[in-house]
C-alpha cells in the first residue's frame, strides 16, 4: 500500500509498504481524513525523527473508519467512524516518529484497549472536521493550562487553527469576553465566525489601548500605565513581540499561556514583570484532552468546519504538505481519502 514518508532531509515521497495484518487484539483502520500540522514540515526539514533510521511515516491528525476488528476486541464494529489518540500506539507515536503514519492507506491499532486509542463518533460528522480532533485537543490543553474561570476576560494572539480552537475552548469554560489579535483580515473574520466577541488588527491598532476599551482599566497603585483588565492571555502566534507586549501591559495577577512554537529566543524584562506577578505557563500536547474535545466537535461541528481552509485528496498529499508549509498560503490543510 502507499504511505507518505520523509525520505531525506527536506524531501517527502510515496513509499510502498506492507499491508498490515491484524491479530485477535488489533483493529485495522482506513484513514478517511488527516490534517497537516506545522510539525510535519519540521520533521521533513530534519529528514525524519531521530533515532528512527530510514523513512519516517507522516500524518498524526487522523479520523478513520474501522475496516477489521480482531476476534478479542470488544466495543467496536466494522464501519465505525473514529478519532484517534496518536500518542497511545504501542509501536510509537503515529505520524511522529512511530512505525506508522496516518497519511497511509491503512493503519493498524495493535493491542486495542477500549477508551484508550479510539473514540467512536457519529457518522454525520464530515471527515475533514473530525480530523481536527487532535489539534483541537492541543488547543484545549492550552486553555486548561491557563486555568480560566467563568467570567474571565481573555485575549488570544494568533487566529490560526490552535488560536481558533482556543476561542472555542475558552467559550466552553465560561469566558465572559474573548478578543483575538492577528494581522490577517481573513483570519480575524474567522475568529468572529467561531465566536470571538471582538478582534484587533495589531498592525493598525494600539492593542493595549483597544483592550482597555473592551475589558476596562486594570491599572492599580502598584501597577500603573495602560493596563487592560484582561485576566488571561494566550500566545498562539509565536511572534517574538507577543510575550513582551503582554508583559508590558498585563494587570496584576494576569496569566500568559504560551502554546506557540517560538523559533528564536524571546527577551522579557523581569524587572517590569515583577510588580505584576504575571503568571507564565506553557502548553504542549494533550495529556488528557484528546477525547475531552470530541463531544464539543460533534455538537458544534459547523463552527469547527470554519477552521479548515483547504481540502485535498490523498493522491495530492505531497502537494498538501507543500501548501501547508508555505507562509500565508493556507490556514488549515486537510487531506481526505476516497
Image (spheres, rainbow, N blue to C red):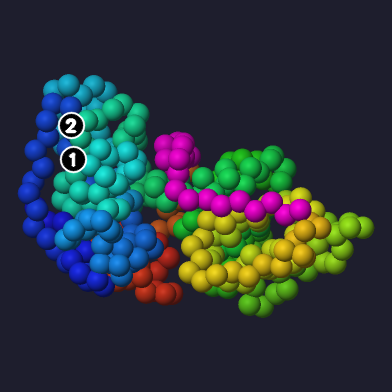
Is residue 134 rendered to the left or right of residue 173? left
Label 2: state its secondary structure: loop
Q: Residue at x 17, y 37 (%)?
A: 28
Q: Is residue 136 above or below residue 190?
A: above
Q: Is residue 280 magenta?
A: yes
Q: Position of residue 210 (x, y in %)?
A: 75, 67
Q: Residue at x 76, y 50 (%)?
A: 253
State the separation of the CA atoms marked 2 and 1.
Answer: 7 Å
Q: Say which of 230 and 252 sits in front.
A: 252
Q: Residue at x 33, y 51 (%)?
A: 61
Q: How many marks?
A: 2
Is residue 230 rendered to the left or right of residue 294? right
Extent of the magenta region: 277-298
Q: Position of residue 296 (x, y in %)?
A: 48, 39
User: Residue beneath label 2, please?
Assistant: 26
Q: Is residue 63 magenta?
A: no
Task: Give the mark nearest the N terminus, 2 or 1.
Answer: 2
User: Residue beneath label 1, please?
Assistant: 108
| Residue that sits furthest to the bottom in the current view | 204
Q: Mark yes or no: residue 294 visible.
A: no
Label 1: state its secondary structure: strand
Is the C-beta separation of discs 2 and 1 under 8 Å? Answer: yes
Tag 2: Cα neighbours inside 10 Å, few (<14), some, or many (≥20)? many
Amino acid at each position: 500500500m502507499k504511505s507518505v514518508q520523509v525520505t531525506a532531509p527536506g524531501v517527502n515521497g510515496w513509499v510502498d509498504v506492507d499491508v498490515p495484518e491484524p491479530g485477535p487484539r488489533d483493529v485495522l483502520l482506513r484513514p478517511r481524513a488527516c490534517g497537516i500540522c506545522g510539525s510535519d514540515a519540521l520533521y521533513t526539514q530534519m529528514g525524519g525523527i531521530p533515532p528512527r533510521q530510514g523513512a519516517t511515516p507522516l500524518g498524526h491528525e487522523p479520523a478513520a473508519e474501522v475496516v477489521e476488528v480482531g476476534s478479542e476486541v470488544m466495543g467496536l464494529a466494522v464501519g465505525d467512524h473514529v478519532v484517534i489518540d496518536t500518542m497511545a500506539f504501542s509501536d510509537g507515536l503515529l505520524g511522529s516518529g512511530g512505525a506508522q503514519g496516518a497519511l497511509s492507506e491503512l493503519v493498524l491499532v495493535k493491542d486495542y484497549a477500549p477508551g484508550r486509542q479510539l473514540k467512536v463518533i457519529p457518522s454525520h460528522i464530515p471527515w475533514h472536521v473530525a480530523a481536527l480532533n487532535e489539534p483541537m485537543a492541543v488547543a484545549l490543553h492550552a486553555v486548561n493550562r491557563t486555568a480560566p474561570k467563568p467570567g474571565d476576560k481573555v485575549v488570544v494572539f494568533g487566529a490560526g487553527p490552535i488560536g481558533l480552537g482556543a476561542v472555542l475552548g475558552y467559550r466552553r469554560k465560561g469566558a465572559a469576553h474573548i478578543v483575538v489579535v492577528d494581522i490577517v483580515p481573513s483570519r480575524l473574520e474567522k475568529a468572529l465566525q467561531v465566536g470571538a466577541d471582538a478582534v484587533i488588527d495589531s498592525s493598525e491598532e494600539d492593542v493595549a489601548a483597544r483592550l482597555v476599551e473592551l475589558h476596562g482599566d486594570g491599572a492599580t497603585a502598584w501597577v500603573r500605565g495602560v493596563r487592560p483588565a484582561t485576566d488571561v492571555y494566550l500566545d498562539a502566534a509565536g511572534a517574538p513581540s507577543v510575550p513582551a507586549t503582554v508583559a508590558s501591559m498585563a494587570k496584576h495577577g494576569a496569566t500568559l499561556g504560551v502554546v506557540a512554537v517560538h523559533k528564536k529566543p524571546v527577551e522579557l524584562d523581569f524587572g517590569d514583570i515583577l510588580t505584576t506577578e504575571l503568571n507564565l505557563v506553557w502548553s504542549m500536547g494533550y495529556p488528557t484532552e484528546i477525547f475531552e474535545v470530541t463531544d464539543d466537535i460533534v455538537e458544534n461541528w459547523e463552527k469547527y468546519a470554519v477552521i479548515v481552509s483547504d481540502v485535498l485528496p490523498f493522491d495530492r498529499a505531497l502537494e498538501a504538505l507543500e501548501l501547508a508549509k508555505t507562509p500565508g498560503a493556507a490556514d488549515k490543510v486537510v487531506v481526505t481519502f476516497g
